[in-house]
Structures are given as C-alpha cells and as structure tokens.
C-alpha cells in the first residue's frame, strides 16, 4: 500500500513538473503550433481575438517560455564560456569570480568549464561550447607543455571569438599581467635584502606564464652579477602545494645551510615551503626567507605572511571581458586588441622582512 501511494505521489509530482509545450496549447486551442508560437511572440499576423485566447490558455496551463531555446532558434545564446585549468587553484577561482561579477553588468550569462589541466579535455570542452552556441570564450590554457591549437581552431571555425586570459597562447588576443617584470622585482627585492643564496621552485618548463617568470629571475640575477648556474632550480610537475613540499624537502636535503632564500612561482607553493620549513624548525626569514607570486589569500593567511607579487585579477577579468565583447561586436580582432599587459606590484611581508 505504501509503495502504491509512493508511486501515485511520484506520478503526481512528475505531472506537475512536466513542462507545458506549445503543441499542448495548440491542441487545446484547436490551432496550429505555428499560430501558437506567433501569438506568444506578439506577431501581428495572428488575429487579436485568437491571440488573446491562446495567451489565456497558456496562462491557465502554466506555460513558461524557455528563453534559452528561444535564443537558440535566433542563433543567439547570450552565453559566454570561460575555460580554466583548475578551479581549486585560488588564482583561477578568483578570476572566475570577478569575471562572473563583470558579466552581471551585461546581457550575457557565464558558463564555466574546467579542463582539469588536460589538453585532451579542452577539445571536448570546445565541442560543448560549439553545441551550446556560446557567443564568445575566455580561455586559460593548461599549465602543462602544450602547443596544440586544435581546440581554439575548432571554436574559431564555428565563428566563436576567443580571448586568452592571465597568459598568452599562440596568436590569440590576450590580457595578462607583466609576469616577467613581476619576478624581476621579486628576485631583486630578495637580493637587495641580502638573500643572495636562493633556490627557485617552479612548475614544468615550456609553459608560457612560467617561462616568463623564469626569464625575470634570470634578468634579476644578471643585473646583480650572480651566475644563474649557481641557483638551484626545481621544475616540478605541477604548481601545487604538495609539489612545493616535495621540492622543499629536496632543497633541505641538498642545500640546508647553503641557501638563505627560496622563491616560488605562486603563493600556494610558497605556503607549502613555509609549512615544510616550520616542520624542520627552520625560522622564517631569519634562516631562510620565502617569497611567492600572485598575492592570493594564502599570502595573508600563511603562518608567516608571504612577500609576493600582486596580479590585479579583477582588472584582468574586466579587461578580458571588454576585449571579448569588442570582438563579438566587431567580428574581428583589431591590432590594438591583440595583447594587453597589466602592471604588477611588489608586496612585502614578514616572510622576507
């Protein structure tokens, strides 16, 4: 008996939740589906009395128009896509947050796609974006060596404008911070403070944003007449907390007592280094100073606040959206739109002071 009652409730709720279709209204009004569609869209071709009857029946039946389906018919989805490697990375999460806030000031909604740092996943995402008829895409490529442009070319072939954000990729228009100068400022600060025996922790090579940071490191070393070959470089498989902990253990095993500073390519790695050093009872910065990059929430919540480089994430998001909307409006990438570099700021905190 209970099972029968459950089935009855289930079917009642299912019936209540079933969307009323245009064909249902047409059947009840005894007109064609085309006439219903025209009437609901206030087309003057439909007789006034007939239109009133159709709208009354639609209201009585609880008909709700599907704006997404309607936009698809018009070949406009009013939807933008953003592709990010990893939403657990606080930098990317902040970017998506600010981008979504910016989108609220427009007529566009934002769909978020996460590649999981896998190039093959990006190609499936491109297919999904095409299927949903996205009107534009803001793209952050994976943090692994990858020069495959297939996913971007698929989008462009479908007439979907693409902007690269936080880094650069191929010939795409891009908005990013001055990463090379940021690392130059950070390393120069460390050297000026007397931390001249440094180690450097990064992710994989041949990733544009990381390569720019390394270029800034080498420029700073050269300006202080320090041979780059004397600086231990650790290129980890990912720019994560655990990879930084592993690198810190290697540094302590090989170079303890021989270095007095560690520079990381982001704040989450710097936090991993700080926690590892504290586990070994190493005082920061008295014995080893630590610096990060991005000025994320980790730089201020760390047990020792982290000296870092501030990337203005909200400005990157705002300008990326402006650039994308300009491409959507004009239909082509103007030369002035191709690349935009946003200045960075050195932020000093207790980890080096």
Image: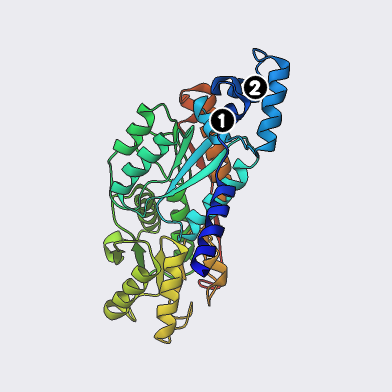
Residue 197 visible from this viewpoint: no
Asked whether 127 or 97 is in front, the reply is: 127
- Residue 102 on image: x %, y %: 61, 43
The residue lying furthest to the front in this view is 1
Query: In percent of the image, x 58 and y 46: which residue is there?
Result: 100
* Element assignment for label 1: helix
- Residue 305 on image: x %, y %: 55, 72
Tell me whether the residue at label 2 lies in contact with that at label 1, contact meaning CB atoms closer than 8 angstroms.
no
Q: Which residue is mark 2?
A: 39
Query: In percent of the image, x 35 and y 27: which residue is there?
Result: 157
Q: Which residue is mark 1?
A: 22
In-image side of 353 versus 332 (left or right): right
Q: Pointer 1: residues within 10 angstroms few (<14), some, or many (20+)?
A: some
Asked whether 80 or 247 is in front, the reply is: 80
The residue lying furthest to the top in this view is 45
The count of marks equals 2
> Which of the image's four quarters has the C terminus?
bottom right
Residue 62 placement: quadrant: top right
- Up-down relation of residue 6 to residue 23 (above or below): below
* Element assignment for label 2: helix
The residue lying furthest to the bottom in this view is 281
Query: In percent of the image, x 47 and y 83: which residue is there?
Result: 283
- Residue 52 on image: x %, y %: 72, 23
Residue 263 visible from this viewpoint: yes
How is the protein colored in the picture?
rainbow
Asked whether 166 or 76 is in front, the reply is: 76
């Amino acid at each position: 008996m209970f099972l029968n009652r459950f089935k009855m409730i289930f079917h009642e709720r299912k019936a209540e939740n079933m969307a009323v279709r245009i064909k249902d209204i047409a059947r009840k009004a005894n007109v064609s589906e085309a006439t219903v569609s025209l009437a609901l869209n206030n087309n003057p071709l439909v007789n006034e009395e007939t239109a009133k009857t159709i709208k009354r029946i639609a209201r009585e039946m609880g008909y709700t128009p599907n704006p997404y389906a309607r936009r698809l018919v018009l070949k406009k989805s009013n939807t933008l896509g953003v592709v990010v490697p990893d939403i657990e990375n606080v930098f990317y999460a902040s970017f998506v947050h600010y981008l979504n806030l910016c989108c609220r000031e427009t007529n566009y909604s934002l769909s978020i796609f996460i590649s999981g740092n896998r190039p093959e996943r990006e190609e499936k995402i491109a297919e999904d974006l095409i299927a949903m008829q996205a009107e534009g895409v803001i793209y952050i490529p994976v943090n692994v060596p990858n020069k495959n442009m297939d996913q971007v070319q698929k989008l462009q072939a479908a007439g979907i404008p693409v902007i690269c954000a936080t880094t650069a990729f191929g010939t795409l228009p891009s908005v990013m911070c001055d990463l090379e100068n940021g690392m130059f400022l950070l390393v120069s600060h460390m050297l000026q403070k007397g931390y001249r025996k440094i180690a450097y922790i990064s992710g994989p090579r041949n990733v544009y944003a990381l390569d720019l940071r390394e270029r800034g490191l080498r420029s700073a070393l050269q300006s202080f007449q320090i041979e780059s070959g004397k600086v231990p470089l650790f290129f980890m498989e990912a720019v994560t907390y655990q990879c930084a902990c592993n690198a810190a253990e290697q540094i302590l095993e090989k170079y303890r007592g021989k270095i007095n500073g560690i520079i990381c390519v982001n704040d989450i790695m710097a936090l991993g280094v700080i926690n590892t050093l504290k586990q070994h009872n190493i005082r920061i910065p008295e014995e080893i100073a630590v610096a990060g990059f991005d000025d994320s929430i980790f730089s201020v919540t760390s047990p020792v606040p982290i000296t870092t480089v501030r990337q203005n994430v909200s400005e990157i998001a705002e300008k990326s959206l402006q650039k994308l909307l300009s491409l959507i409006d004009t239909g082509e990438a103007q030369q002035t739109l191709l690349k935009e570099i946003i200045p960075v700021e050195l932020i000093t905190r207790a980890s080096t002071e």
